[in-house]
Amino acid sequence: MAAKIPEKFLDHIRPFLGGTGAVEEFVETAQRPLPITLRRNPKKLTKESWAQLVQEQNWTLETLPFLAEGFTLIGAKNPGTLLEHRLGFFYLQEAASMIPAEVLRRLNPKATLILDLCAAPGSKTTQIASFAMENSLIVANEPSASRLQVLVANLVRLGHSNCVVAQQDGREIGKLLPEAFDAILVDAPCSGEGTLRKDRQALRGWNPKRFRKITKTQQELLESALQSLAPGGVLIYSTCALSPEENQLAIANFVHRHPHELLTCDLGETIPELSKSVTQDGYLWVSPHHYDTGGFFVAAFKKAGQAPNRNDLSNAGSEVSSPLISLQQTLKQNFDFELSQCPGSLEVRDGKVILNPPGFLRVARTLGLNRRGLRIATLSEGEALLHQEFALAFGASFRRNFLEVSRDEARHFLYGGELNPSIEKMQIGKQILLRYQGHPLGFARWENGRFRNLLGPSFVQQSVR
Ligand SMILES: C[S@@+](CC[C@H](N)C(=O)[O-])C[C@H]1O[C@@H](n2cnc3c(N)ncnc32)[C@H](O)[C@@H]1O
């Protein structure tokens, strides 16, 4: 049964809901469960393979009005337990939550240094990574340690290699990295009122005093973001709240403090498909009844001034030591894979070989990253133990030494099981990549007539169908 919407809350947002019948429509929509919505991950799946998957699964999809890669899935249940989800083909995300990153894409498609200030669990970071240019760097910041783990798991599952992760209080980043980024998303911590269709507790005990602390944090995050934004850069602010204190009023305060630095972007022009949600000031106040979504607010600004020239994001000064050369040769020999062609630079750190995305040196020295780039291998007693996240990001390009397995074998492997396929000539002790329909599952090692599963505990998943 749907939770009752508190009258006080309805009165509070009534002025924004619209004309005749809007309140009833809001209440009726808010009490219905959210549709299942998802985003195709172009890093893993071409449009053709996506069409094939849709056919195989017998899915009925409707494309979201504002995003070609976003869909409503009609009639299907639990897509999150499918093998295809584990393989990173798609990301389950509430439709309105896809708006802020799409706004960023439309306003600054060529941004190369991007900050996601409040990033976990990574819905918007992974969306940004899916369209960001190959030579770009995305810094995903999240202060909460437990939420940060989920963020990293999502980045790894979707195979993104151009993201680094910082664990800072976002309010400090402006001081640490002034005028550094071309685009910044502040998807701020908020009261979460807009999640009322998903979370029956979202409005429990609602009262207008609860905003005080959160609105202060929101202002401080906005200040920090503005400081960290390069001239000409784009700043997006979003919340999944519906009250004006966290949205229109928060932005009015912010603009009031920086009348000459902030140029408001009219989102009615940027994303005309969402015309029902455009406010007088050119922001988006997305009510659930507008497009059958959750509630969201989005505002966007350009920072006055001339954007810096960002032609070169190379990590100048990075080393190419002999262990790296040897690893490159091994990968070439074993998998016919050219590590040197991956964007970014390699480093050896605490015995681990890491592929750092282009430009990471610009942030790494100041920010103290929780996770630098993609882990390629651990060097141990002269051997390179290849990492599973390397497999997931680049394994589809290996041209040798991979084994295609059946769907049942793939599921068994992901449960942590060992495989015993009928292969006679395997090189003992060598790591081999297992793939399902060309998509990487992870590494295994041929030992005693079986494939020993090399997935670590964090990669094992019990409920894949
Ligand atoms: C709305 S959620 C972000 C959702 C995320 N952008 C996504 O799309 O998956 C807000 C996040 O802000 C984080 N947060 C809270 N205080 C923060 C601060 N001072 N600086 C940065 N992030 C903060 C919370 O831990 C939470 O993960």
Image: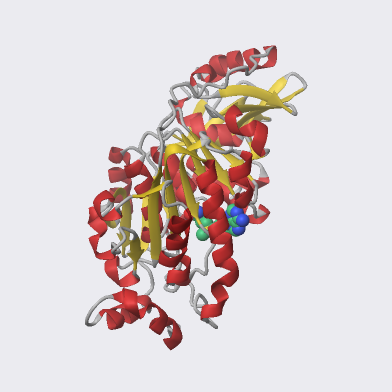
Residue 313: % across, % down: 50, 24
Quadrant housing the N terminus: bottom left
Pick whichever, 289 or 305, lies toward us. Answer: 305
From the viewer's perspective, tell me whether residue 151 is left or right of residue 44: right
Quadrant position of residue 221: bottom right
- Which quarter is ligand 1 in? bottom right
- Indicate the position of residue 212 as horizontal and vertical percent values: 57, 71
Q: Is residue 344 left or right of residue 31?
A: right
Q: Residue at x 54, y 20 (%)?
A: 339
In the displayed structure, does residue 335 sit left or right of residue 38?
Answer: right
Tell me if 27 is positioned left or right of 342 in this view.
left
Observer able to see residue 327? yes
Residue 138 vs 270, above or below: the answer is above
Between 7 and 330, the residue placed more toward the observer is: 7
The image quarter containing residue 455 is top right
The front one of 344 and 205 is 205
Residue at image point 48% right, 42% down:
158
- Residue sitting at the far right: 381
Q: Could you tell me which residue is drawn at 52 percent across and 37 percent down?
A: 179
Rendered position, 19 above or below 308: below
